[in-house]
Image (tube, rainbow, N blue to C red):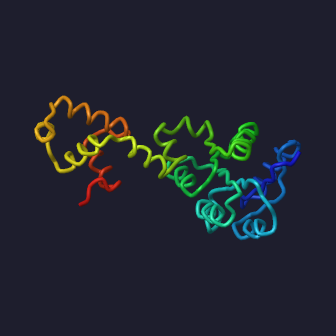
Amino acid sequence: MKKIKLALVDDHKIVRDGIASLLMYEDKVEVVAEASNAEELLEILKNMEIDIIILDIFLPKPVGIELTKIIVKQFPKTKVIILSGNIEEDIVSGAFNAGADGYLPKDTEKEELLEAIYSVHDFNEQYLSNSIKNNLSASFIKKAKYGDKYSQSKLASLTEKEINIIKLFSEGLSYKEIANKLEISTRTVEAHKNNILEKLELRTIIDIVKYAIKNKIIEL
């Protein structure tokens, strides 16, 4: 049986040694390379086929997110799982948007590390640690994992009438003015607004206007 080839990338040797020892007796995975920085890793990738890179996000320059972008561009068949002590939302989101296939905290148990490896390699699925999921909102998890695709899917879920109502709210019209313009009741306008808020996972009309500007539904 062909083993999954791993490369461990961390500027602390003790971390690399720890991960390697955890995986030493696994039948399906094999640590075939280690690197302490981006330069060493890129040299390895030029000379060796690696299935998955276990990558510390806070490497010396370039940092893990930038290095992930380089890997995705130059070695698209190689998967990247981020291993980091930082689980802040912007960092997690940045990693997935850069093209990472998985994100785990550094205190991850062996069982979950293997689960992430198999999910990414065998099923071509992105993996987000359960402990991180517990600290993030459902909408953020989707944004982190699917990035622009998720935003586009939300926009695509809007009906033509809902987009029209978004434009009218953005023009500063009141419920009554929108109702008169569209020849519907104010209650129907409010129902459409509530549907829009739910679909876009927003809270207020101001949020709707900001969304419309950001996604070029309206032009300033």
Name the quadrant of the C terminus.
bottom left
Q: Position of residue 90 (x, y in %)?
A: 49, 52
Number of marks: 0
Which residue shows up at 76% across the image and 56% down it?
8
169 and 210: which is toward the camera: 169
Q: Position of residue 30 (x, y in %)?
A: 84, 50
Does 92 sit left or right of 161 as displayed? right
* Image-quadrant location for residue 130: top right
Above or below: residue 84 compared with residue 63 = above
Estimate the x, y position of residue 83 in percent, counting from the top left. Answer: 67, 50
Quadrant containing the N terminus is: top right
Task: Give above or below for 98 relative to 165.
Answer: below
Q: Nearer the viewer, residue 44 or 192?
A: 192
Which residue is nearer to you in this view: 101 or 150? 150
Residue positioned 74% across, 42% down in the render: 118
> Where is residue 158 drawn, in percent x and y?
35, 41
| Left or right relative to 185: residue 44 | right
Tell me if 193 is positioned left or right of 79 in this view: left
Residue reaching furthest to the top: 187
Quarter holding residue 205: top left
Residue appearing at x 52%, y 51% in the figure: 93
